[in-house]
Image: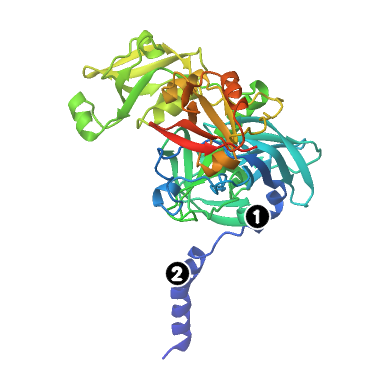
Amino acid sequence: MNFAAVANAFAFVATFLFVPLASATSLPDFTALVERQGSAVVNISTTQVRAERPQSPLPFPGIDESDPMFDFFRKFIPRHPELPGADPDNQSLGSGFIISADGYILTNAHVVEEAEEILVRLADRSEYQAKVIGVDVRSDVALIKIEASGLPQVTLGDPDRLKVGEWVVAIGSPFGFDQSVTAGIVSAKGRSLPDENFVPFIQTDVAINPGNSGGPLFNLRGEVVGINSQIYSRTGGFMGLSFAIPIDLVMDVQNQLRTKGRVRRGRIGVAIQEITRDLADGFGLPRAQGALVSSVEPDGPAARAGLLQGDVILRFSGKTVDVSSDLPRIVAGVQPGSAAAVEVFRNGAPMALEVTVGEWQDPKEAPVAGAAPRTLPAPNKLGMVLSAPTAAQRRERDMDEGLIVERVQGVAARAEIRPGDAILALVIAGKQSRLSSIEEFNRLVGGIQVDQQVTLLVKRGDATSYVSVRAGK
């Protein structure tokens, strides 16, 4: 037997079998990325007032936090304590990252919403008070600033170059553990989530937990490609589904917040639905593509441009509408007042139209750049701070009268009155008085004696109920 020949043959086989196998199982090294970019990631803690959120109708109790529906698309930080009578101020925690050496920082809107105080802690453990430059609730983006100079800053990337299956890294402060690093891959791009029509989310399997919210998502080149914003969870913890806001959209939002104090978005005034295979066959489309116009707002931009119910929008402003969820994002990205080309499919043939884009009105206004934080008055004898509803809130809630609860404590909190409820009337000594203004409410409350029983007519969602409280001091 020729042992040399056998050895050579074995070495030849090993070259093709074992070496590629070893290289195929090697993992990327993230150490250089973390060392280079980690110093620009910050921890953000806030003291904030409990904000309004959707509630279940009275008199039924709210959905328990163990219910799977409660956490369907929960934000990362527990912002709303529910203990009756508890202090309405709440410590919350999130992350952010520095985008300029003079102290501009990006994070999520829900990290700093209703914040009375914002504290930013850098990687070197130095701490700064921050002010809010602007907040855009619809995209969940906030721009804040600290007074400092010579700060490290991140490098921004291009989310369009990001590929499904590509490695990505998150750095943040889950549960307050600063500078925690987790890694995974891009699971999908352009994801649409419920009630989030304006953001084409990047889906990843990077481990994200409470406190990561607002932190950066990096590609392997050390470039920020998104802001970690949401998770899908049935338990409140990480389940392998995380969603990040693409950084190009974020930078457009922050630029508008910095220069204008708010974000302007386009609208054309149509209701749309998805094109299924059956609908495509019915309308004579070669394939299931586009957004089917189910209704057109009378005298809206689309109506004035000649769009009709039953049209299928295939392209808008030079961009292809593959699925119906593409259209709101594309339209929102067009500046109001601009003319946009629209390609529709009507009566079996394509047609070209031009629409002058209108402006989408957000019922929740972003704070103006440099504006002082809103200060609420102290709660009164009933433990509530109320505000007059805006025109948008009146339309949304179908309210002709009444006031909105901004803050609760004491007797109102113990009676399970919550921020966001509407108080329509007070019943004092058997007499019911409808509420039409803050002045009327203050006048009525001013005559209430300590320990006097007062009944409130409360509207929550579509349900209305009477709730009794005993006035405090």
Q: Could you say where residue 135 lies in the image, as x and y percent from the top left?
A: 61, 31
Residue 188 is at least partly visible in this image: yes
* Residue at x 68%, y 45% (from the top left corner): 44
Q: Could you say where residue 102 lies in the image, as x and y percent from the top left?
A: 77, 35
Q: Earlier in the sequence, mark 2 or mark 1?
A: 2
* Residue at x 55%, y 44% (from the top left corner): 80
Residue 176 marker = 1
In depth, the one of 236 and 459 nearer the eye is 459
Query: Looking at the rendering, in which quadrant would you find the N terminus?
Result: bottom left
Front position among marks 2 and 1:
1
State the CA–CA distance, disc 2 to disc 1. 48 Å
In depth, the one of 137 and 102 nearer the eye is 137
Q: Position of 18 compared to 254: left or right? A: left
Q: How was this image coloured?
A: rainbow
Q: Are marks 2 and 1 in contact (CB under 8 Å)?
A: no
Residue with the most extreme bottom position: 1
Residue 473 in which image quadrant: top right
Q: Could you say where residue 155 lies in the image, as x and y percent from the top left?
A: 66, 41
As drawn, 286 above or below 358: below
Residue 379 in which image quadrant: top right
Q: Secondary structure at mark 2?
A: helix
Q: Amino acid at mark 1?
A: Gly
Q: Which residue is mark 2?
A: 16
Label 2 neighbour load within 10 Å: few <14, some 14-19, many 20+: few
Q: Secondary structure at mark 1?
A: helix
Q: Position of 256 compared to 39: left or right? A: left
Residue 264 marker = none
Q: Could you say where residue 263 lies in the image, as x and y percent from the top left?
A: 57, 24
Residue 290 is at least partly visible in this image: no
Residue with the most extreme left position: 282
